[in-house]
């Protein structure tokens, strides 16, 4: 390696000198260093450059006996020896500025003073050597030779840096790791090279090393400053973020406090605006909006009712229905809200959110009658969230609407009142919460019934498995002729509760089948048929007891309920025929002048069979029509039945007649087209994967892990509204479905009663077998024909 350096050292020296000059120029235009330190570093780079340049010249003119050779050899060697000590001196100045200039140490270390004096003496000895030949001499051929005191000139470049290192080591903690490494390199690399050079005569690796460490000193200083700048920037960013978070918390607390004060006007229940804001933000998140946009939606929704400040309290707090004139005043709320928030110029989205949240997607809203995407997106999101919270909240003028009705509201008004995208997201949120929620309604453990039906328990579901209700009833008669008895109400309701208010009956689709008493009396309200038999031992029917223990056993098989009530030796058995299999049933306890306590519910594993019931009415079937390629089916409740799967090749057409059952009252009580895979081609079979469930009312769902569905629904001129559409489905209609398969893409199209649907299913797992089946909800499918 040394031979290689010896051969090319002049070129190496030139390259290093050029690099050193470049770094000196960079230092000159650098602004990240203090003036004093910058000038010291520039001096070190210039000295290192000069040292290497003169060393190079010494090699070039060595042996040149001309006058210029004579002069350059002596000048060059002088400056090589002189500047070697000068580098030590300048480095000492750098250390003093590094420690004392930054106030890392408050004193001038004696060891550094000693180094300064020693390096100055070294430079003086170099001058003396020019007249005495102490360090080197030249022969008659102008060739350099080491003098008798040659090793003396190595004392300062070796011993002084070691002394400097003791100071560096002592104050290691006062500088960064990068600076410490650069100082150590600056000290020990030239020392090591100097020792090597003693034995490798004829090469200047010490001077080369001095240039390299001088360059490295600049580089490490730059890296240290850059790191410090990054750390300072991070601290600054952290402080800015913390400031931003403080401002956000302040804004959040201010708006929340303002909203709470606003809600004291009683326009909505406490917490209403917060519910709207949280739901609006959730819709925005599910729509893929970024965090900043979601926060904008949240705060705009939170302040949507700020315009109530401009509405008279007499209108806001009025308990009766508002007059038309008062309604018009109330409709000015979004305009007032927009005017108030328009002064917050930094957040224009606040104004847009509150001013246009009462606009409708079809242009029938207010205050400006904007239509479609002309309505700001933030307002379209808030409109959906506000409508949902309003429908599901008990307010002064209305009770909370059950999930099933709210869902239909969004399905029917998607594309008219609401943006279809955000309405669909709202439906997804409702479906998830409904499916994941605990649908079990807690039943009271005791009831105190004074007057007839003054207290009624929650409904206990009557299912295909036998359920037992046990309770104790205490008589509460205050006079000898008083009447005391419990009774059981059989009913159906969306919320599983008894209702006697006309508005609640309508909202929750409450239907009462009948009521049964322990003595055998009963009332059939809207059951198709009802048969009750009372059995008792002799005299037990007239026996009066203050406290009686009861056991009720009940189960439902298709459209019949089997019911039994025992009280001591008294047994009531009943058969209740419902209108059809679509009906659900619940049993609620009530009574008159009695205390019903210790209510216990036991759900058994025993499933009712047809042999357990006494059929008192014929089965009602709506499939008594022409049967074609596939057997007719009747779907009494959501997907309780489906056709056999038909394998989809390239093209498939399915024709069928459908009839919504008399009990159907929702827009999704209609046929569904199901795309799936299973090993045996059956719905729910082994290895089942559901790619698409397409409802002919325009809804689509599927397993997102294995398929993606893109649906397009259009309402044609013949579509006259969803209410009329539902009535037409009960009259029956023909339906045609076209399916086209191309690789992993399936296009499904159908048109019925003014609704045109096209759905594209993209299967993520390749283009394997796909099967098609028909199913639905509260609908009969007949005359099913398949054409390939």
Image (tube, rainbow, N blue to C red):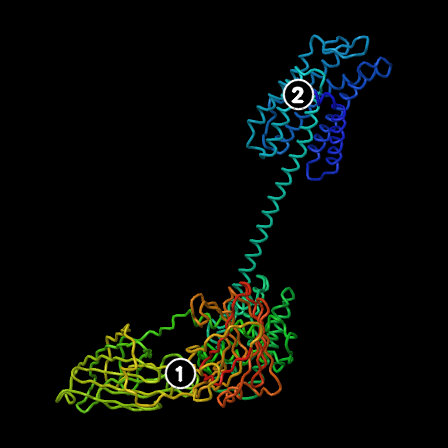
Q: Nearer the viewer, residue 202 or 49?
A: 202
In primary-sequence order, the first of circles 1 and 2 is: 2
Q: Give the quadrant of residue 448.
A: bottom left
Image mark for residue 414: none
Residue at 56% in and 84% down: 752
Could one spot residue 680 in this view of the protein?
A: yes
**Mark 2: few/some/many CA within 10 Å (<14, 14-19, 20+):** many
Q: Is residue 562 above or below residue 123?
A: below
Q: Is residue 752 above or below residue 88?
A: below
**Mark 1: few/some/many CA within 10 Å (<14, 14-19, 20+):** many
Residue at 55% in and 27% down: 170
Closer mark to the observer between disc 1 and disc 2: 1
Instruction: State the residue position of label 1.
Output: 582
The secondary element bearing badge 1 is classed as loop
> Percent from the top left, x then y, of residue 301?
55, 70
Q: Quadrant of the N terminus?
A: top right
Could one spot residue 262 in this view of the protein?
A: no
Q: Is residue 193 above or below residue 533?
A: above
> Percent from the top left, x then y, of residue 109?
60, 24
Q: Nearer the viewer, residue 757 or 370?
A: 757
Q: CA distance from mark 1 to mark 2?
A: 103 Å
Q: Give the quadrant of residue 58.
A: top right
Instruction: State the residue position of label 2.
Output: 116
Residue at 60% in and 21% down: 162
Q: Is residue 127 above or below residue 419?
A: above
> Percent from the top left, x then y, of residue 299?
56, 67
The secondary element bearing badge 2 is classed as helix
Q: Nearer the viewer, residue 505 or 571?
A: 571
In contact (CB < 8 Å): disc 1 and disc 2: no
Q: Residue furthest left?
A: 538
> Percent from the top left, x then y, of residue 211?
70, 27
Q: Is residue 258 left or right of residue 545?
A: right
């Amino acid at each position: 390696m040394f031979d290689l350096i010896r051969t090319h050292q002049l070129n190496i020296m030139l390259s290093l000198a050029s690099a050193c000059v470049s770094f000196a120029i960079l230092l000159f235009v650098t602004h990240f260093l203090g003036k004093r330190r910058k000038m010291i570093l520039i001096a070190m780079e210039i000295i290192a450059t000069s040292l290497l340049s003169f060393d190079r010249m010494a090699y070039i003119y060595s042996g040149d006996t001309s006058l210029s050779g004579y002069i350059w050899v002596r000048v060059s060697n002088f400056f090589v020896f002189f500047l070697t000590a000068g580098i030590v001196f300048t480095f000492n100045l750098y250390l003093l500025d590094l420690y004392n200039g930054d106030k890392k140490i408050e004193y001038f270390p004696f060891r550094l003073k000693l180094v300064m004096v020693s390096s100055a003496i070294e430079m003086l000895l170099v001058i003396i050597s020019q007249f005495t030949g102490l360090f080197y001499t030249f022969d008659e051929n102008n060739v350099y030779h080491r003098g008798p005191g040659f090793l003396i000139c190595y004392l300062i470049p070796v011993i002084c840096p070691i002394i400097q290192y003791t100071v560096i080591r002592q104050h290691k903690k006062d500088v960064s790791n990068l600076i410490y490494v650069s100082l150590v390199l600056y000290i020990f690399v030239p020392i090591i090279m100097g020792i090597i050079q003693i034995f490798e005569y004829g090469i200047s690796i010490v001077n080369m090393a001095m240039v390299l460490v001088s360059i490295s000193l600049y580089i490490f200083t730059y890296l240290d400053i850059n790191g410090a700048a990054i750390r300072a920037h991070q601290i600054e960013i952290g402080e800015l973020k913390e400031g931003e978070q403080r401002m956000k918390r302040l804004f959040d607390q201010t708006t929340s406090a303002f909203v709470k004060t606003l809600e004291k006007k009683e326009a909505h229940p406490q917490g209403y605006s917060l519910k709207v804001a949280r739901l609006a933000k959730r819709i925005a998140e599910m729509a893929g909006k970024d965090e900043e946009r979601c926060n904008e939606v949240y705060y705009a929704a939170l302040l949507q009712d700020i315009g109530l400040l401009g509405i008279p309290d007499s209108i806001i707090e009025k308990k009766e229905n508002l007059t038309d004139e008062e309604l018009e005043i109330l409709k000015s709320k979004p305009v007032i809200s927009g005017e108030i928030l328009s002064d917050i110029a930094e957040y224009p989205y606040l104004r847009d959110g509150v001013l246009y949240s009462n606009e409708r997607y079809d242009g029938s809203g207010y205050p400006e009658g904007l239509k479609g995407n002309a309505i700001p997106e933030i307002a379209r999101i808030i409109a959906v969230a506000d409508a949902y919270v309003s429908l599901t909240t008990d307010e002064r003028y209305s009770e909370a609407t059950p999930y099933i009705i709210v869902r239909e509201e969004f399905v029917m008004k998607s594309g008219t009142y609401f943006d279809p995208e955000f309405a669909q997201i709202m439906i997804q949120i409702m479906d998830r919460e409904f499916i994941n929620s605990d649908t079990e309604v807690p039943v009271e453990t005791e009831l105190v019934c004074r007057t007839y039906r003054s207290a009624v328990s929650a409904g206990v579901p009557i299912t295909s498995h036998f359920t037992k209700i046990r309770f104790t009833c205490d008589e509460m008669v205050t006079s000898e002729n008083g009447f005391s008895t419990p009774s059981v109400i059989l009913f159906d309701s969306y919320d599983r509760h008894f209702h006697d208010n006309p508005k609640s009956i309508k909202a929750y689709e409450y239907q009462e089948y009948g009521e049964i008493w322990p003595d055998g009396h009963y009332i059939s309200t809207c059951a198709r048929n009802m048969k009750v038999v009372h059995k008792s031992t002799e005299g037990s029917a007239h026996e009066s007891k203050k406290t009686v223990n009861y056991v009720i056993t009940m189960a439902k098989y298709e459209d019949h309920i089997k019911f039994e009530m025992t009280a001591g030796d008294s047994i009531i058995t009943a058969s209740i025929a419902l209108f059809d299999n679509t009906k659900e049933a619940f049993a609620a306890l009530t009574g008159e002048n009695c205390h019903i306590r210790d209510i216990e519910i036991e759900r058994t594993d025993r499933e009712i069979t047809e042999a357990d019931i006494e059929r008192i009415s014929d089965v009602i079937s709506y499939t008594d029509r022409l049967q074609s390629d596939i057997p007719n089916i009747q779907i009494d409740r959501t997907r309780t039945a489906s056709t056999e799967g038909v394998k989809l090749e390239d093209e498939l057409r399915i024709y069928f007649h459908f009839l919504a059952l008399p009990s159907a009252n929702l827009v999704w009580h209609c046929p569904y087209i199901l795309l799936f895979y299973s090993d045996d081609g059956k719905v729910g079979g082994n290895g089942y994967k559901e790619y698409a469930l397409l409802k002919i009312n325009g809804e689509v769902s599927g397993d997102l892990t294995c398929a993606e569905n893109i649906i397009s629904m259009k309402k044609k001129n013949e579509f006259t509204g969803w209410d009329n559409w539902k009535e037409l489905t009960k009259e029956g209609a023909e339906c045609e479905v076209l399916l086209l398969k191309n690789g992993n893409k399936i296009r499904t199209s159908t048109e019925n009663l003014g609704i045109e649907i096209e759905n594209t299913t993209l299967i993520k797992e390749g283009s394997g077998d796909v099967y098609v089946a028909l199913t639905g909800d509260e609908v009969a499918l007949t005359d099913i024909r398949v054409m390939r």
